[in-house]
Image (cartoon, helix red, strand yellow):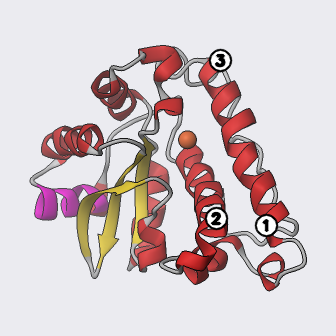
């Protein structure tokens, strides 16, 4: 999926799989609310806020980057970033989760101590994000890093290349895991991460 595609007005792209495809790790009910209500609401609100402004003519990532760190544009940033983050998140998941290979596996070993260490640290950082937010695998100046961000903040706005993410807002897991965010993270990391998508992003990072 190309999350960079221009869409006007901003569109809610279809999920790359059926809502039930990620069960039991993520239930169809969670997907129905998360995609059909939460993600849709960010896209709808973005269209409302962008209407009649120059932002309506821009690509979604450009809106995110243009409004980041501008407190007078906080509402449009929040909704644009959440629209982008969620589309990216759906692409990071697959019912056929595997393991990293090739150049990406070598980079994980070089920068993060290997795949097993990555899995532990990704889960740890995701659990450590206080309140709502995201955990990311990014490439920054040729180096892989794990980062957590609050609310809608996205490393993409900071010029980093996102490889993978997991949404750690409560709406992402509460129906299936209640307050057990670490269990949700462990299950998603073990079962659903789309390493082919991560490898494509890694190649784009150069
Ligand atoms: Fe979410």
Magenta stretch, residue numbers? 104-112
Q: Is residue 16 left or right of residue 178?
A: right
Q: Secondary structure at mark 3?
A: helix
Separation of marks 1 and 2 at Cα, in angstroms: 8 Å
Residue 127 belongs to the span the image colors magenta = no
Q: Are marks 1 and 2 in contact (CB under 8 Å)?
A: yes
Between residues 27 and 50, which one lies in front from this camera angle? 50
Q: Quadrant of residue 76?
A: bottom right
Q: In the rendered image, which quarter contains the N terminus?
A: bottom right
Q: Is residue 191 visible?
A: yes
Q: Quadrant of residue 202?
A: bottom left
According to the image, label 1 marks what residue?
Answer: 49
Q: In the displayed structure, would residue 137 be above or below residue 55?
A: above
Q: In the displayed structure, would residue 25 be above or below residue 8?
A: above
Separation of marks 2 and 3 at Cα, in angstroms: 28 Å
According to the image, label 2 marks what residue?
Answer: 75
Q: Secondary structure at mark 1?
A: helix
Q: Secondary structure at mark 2?
A: helix
Q: Quadrant of residue 19?
A: top right
Residue 27 image offset from top left, x and y in percent: 57, 18
Separation of marks 1 and 3 at Cα, in angstroms: 29 Å
Residue at image coords 47%, 26%: 173
Residue at image coords 57%, 48%: 91
Q: Decide which of tag 1 and tag 2 comes sooner along the chain.
A: 1
Residue 109 belongs to the span the image colors magenta = yes
Ligand 1 under 8 Å from disc 2 Cβ? no
């Amino acid at each position: 999926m190309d999350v960079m595609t221009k869409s006007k007005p901003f569109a809610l792209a279809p999920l790359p799989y059926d809502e039930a495809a990620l069960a039991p790790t993520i239930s169809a009910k969670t997907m129905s609310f998360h995609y059909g209500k939460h993600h849709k609401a960010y896209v709808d609100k973005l269209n409302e806020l962008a209407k009649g402004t120059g932002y309506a003519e821009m690509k979604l990532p450009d809106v995110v980057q243009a409004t980041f760190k501008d407190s007078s544009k906080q509402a449009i940033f929040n909704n644009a970033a959440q629209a982008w983050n969620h589309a990216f998140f759906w692409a990071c998941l697959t019912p056929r989760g595997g393991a990293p290979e090739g150049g990406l596996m070598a980079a994980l070993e070089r920068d993060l101590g290997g795949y097993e260490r990555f899995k532990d640290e990704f889960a740890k950082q995701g659990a450590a994000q206080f309140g709502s937010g995201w955990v990311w695998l990014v490439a920054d100046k040729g180096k892989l890093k794990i980062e957590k961000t609050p609310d809608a903040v996205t490393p993409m706005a900071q010029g980093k290349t996102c490889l993978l993410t997991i949404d750690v807002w409560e709406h992402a897991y509460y129906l299936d895991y209640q307050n057990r965010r670490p269990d949700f993270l462990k299950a998603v990391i073990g079962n659903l991460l789309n390493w082919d998508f991560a490898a494509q992003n890694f190649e784009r990072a150069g």
